[in-house]
């Protein structure tokens, strides 16, 4: 893909542009919508091939692949009335917006593919779930760290629900550091040590020869401290509560 359009230049739009353009001699041409003006101007100043368009229609007209990255609440305002020819390829990254809903809003027969890019696409290190599988969209995200095409939107929504757990993970780390600080540890030391502990977990996760259960078992001494916290805190009640929260999110994503 040589010409990429992005409508909605916020956090994820910025991450996509950075991943596409940073550190490469052959970046694509990128056309940005004018809203999110500060971010759009900054990206176009930093990257030669990135231009800010006069309006959303110009983004569509200039691009082969058009990424829709506005918030769900801005969907109608951003897209109603746009003319999207059947020769375009549309990538929908909006959480909770089904293919049919977007196709109706755009009144187009162009292929529409859903995707879940995460902020680490900026480093070209994030696997992006796509649906349905489309060779050009898969190749696009393969460049940004990997593509995981799934069969249908039901499966896609399950992956989407998983991505809704990320900030809970950060909040868990904040709680650990703040607990240590409450026990007299300097906040900076607590913060730094918690980061170091869980960066180790991140590195272990890259060893795909071991299952998640195996990794957990390998980190745990029978009757040791890890087993104690896991069984006293992350027992069946807590695990069930997490599953229920995910079920609720999945129901709303359908
Ligand atoms: N952040 C993330 O990690 C991920 C986000 N997503 C999805 O991506 C979408 C965007 O999320 P995120 O980047 O976090 O949100 P942001 O709020 O950071 O960005 C949304 C952008 O859309 C712009 N916008 C609003 N109205 C219009 C319009 N009419 N025309 C063009 N642009 C418009 C906003 O501009 P302005 O500032 O001027 O209002 C803003 O720059 C959401 O649907 C979200 O579900 C998907 C995967 C991951």
Image (cartoon, grey):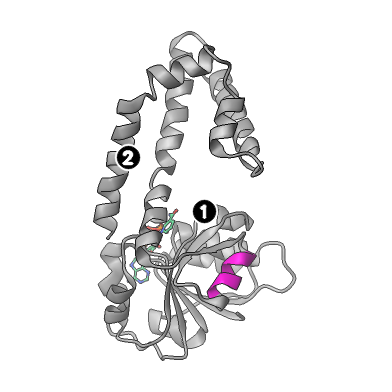
Q: Earlier in the sequence, mark 2 or mark 1?
A: 1
Q: Which residue is mark 2?
A: 243
Q: Which residue is mark 1?
A: 119
Look at the numbered disc 1 and give the secondary structure of its residue.
helix
Query: Ligand 1 shows up in which quadrant of the image?
Result: bottom left
Which SS does the magenta portion mostly show?
helix
Query: What residue is shown at x 50% (from left), y 55% (from top)?
Result: 118
Label 2 or label 1, whichever lies nearer to me, is 2
Looking at the image, residue 2 lies above or below residue 129: below
Is 54 within the magenta? Answer: no
Query: What residue is shown at x 46% (from left), y 88% (from top)?
Result: 61
Q: Give the quadrant of residue 7.
A: bottom left
Extreme-top residue of the structure: 184
Quadrant showing the N terminus? bottom right
Give the Cα separation between the discs numbered 2 and 1. Answer: 25 Å
- Viewer-proximal residue among 44 and 216: 216
Query: What residue is shown at x 41% (from left), y 48% (from top)?
Result: 162
Q: Are marks 2 and 1 in contact (CB under 8 Å)?
A: no
Bin the neighbour count of mark 2 within 10 Å (Cα to Cα): few under 14, some 14-19, many 20 and up.
few
Q: In the drawing, does residue 84 fall left or right of residue 221?
A: left
Give the residues drawn in magenta, as a range.
Answer: 137-143
Q: Give the quadrant of residue 17.
A: bottom right
Quadrant showing the C terminus? bottom left
Measured as percent of width and height from the top left, residue 186 is found at 54, 14
Can the viewer see residue 51 in this picture? no
Count of marks placed on residues: 2
């Amino acid at each position: 893909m040589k010409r990429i359009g992005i409508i909605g230049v916020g956090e994820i739009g910025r991450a996509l542009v950075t991943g596409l353009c940073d550190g490469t001699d052959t970046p694509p041409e990128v056309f940005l919508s004018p809203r999110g003006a500060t971010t759009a101007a900054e990206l176009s100043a930093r990257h030669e091939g990135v231009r800010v368009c006069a309006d959303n229609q110009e983004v569509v007209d200039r691009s082969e692949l058009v990424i829709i990255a506005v918030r769900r609440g801005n969907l109608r305002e951003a897209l109603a009335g746009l003319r999207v020819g059947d020769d375009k390829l549309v990538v929908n990254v909006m959480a909770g917006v089904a293919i049919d809903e977007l196709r109706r809003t755009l009144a187009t027969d162009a292929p529409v593919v859903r995707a879940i890019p995460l902020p680490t696409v900026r480093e070209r290190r994030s696997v992006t779930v796509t649906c349905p599988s489309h060779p050009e969209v898969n190749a696009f995200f393969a460049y940004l760290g990997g593509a995981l095409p799934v069969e249908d939107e039901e499966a896609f929504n399950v992956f989407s629900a998983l991505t809704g757990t990320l900030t809970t993970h950060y909040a868990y780390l904040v709680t650990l550091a703040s607990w240590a600080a409450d026990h007299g540890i300097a906040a900076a030391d607590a913060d730094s040590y918690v980061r170091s502990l869980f960066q180790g977990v991140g590195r272990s996760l890259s060893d795909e020869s071991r299952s998640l259960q195996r990794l957990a078992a390998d980190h745990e001494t029978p009757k040791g401290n890890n087993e104690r916290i896991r069984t006293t805190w992350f027992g069946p009640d807590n695990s069930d509560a997490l599953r229920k929260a995910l079920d609720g999110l999945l129901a709303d994503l359908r």
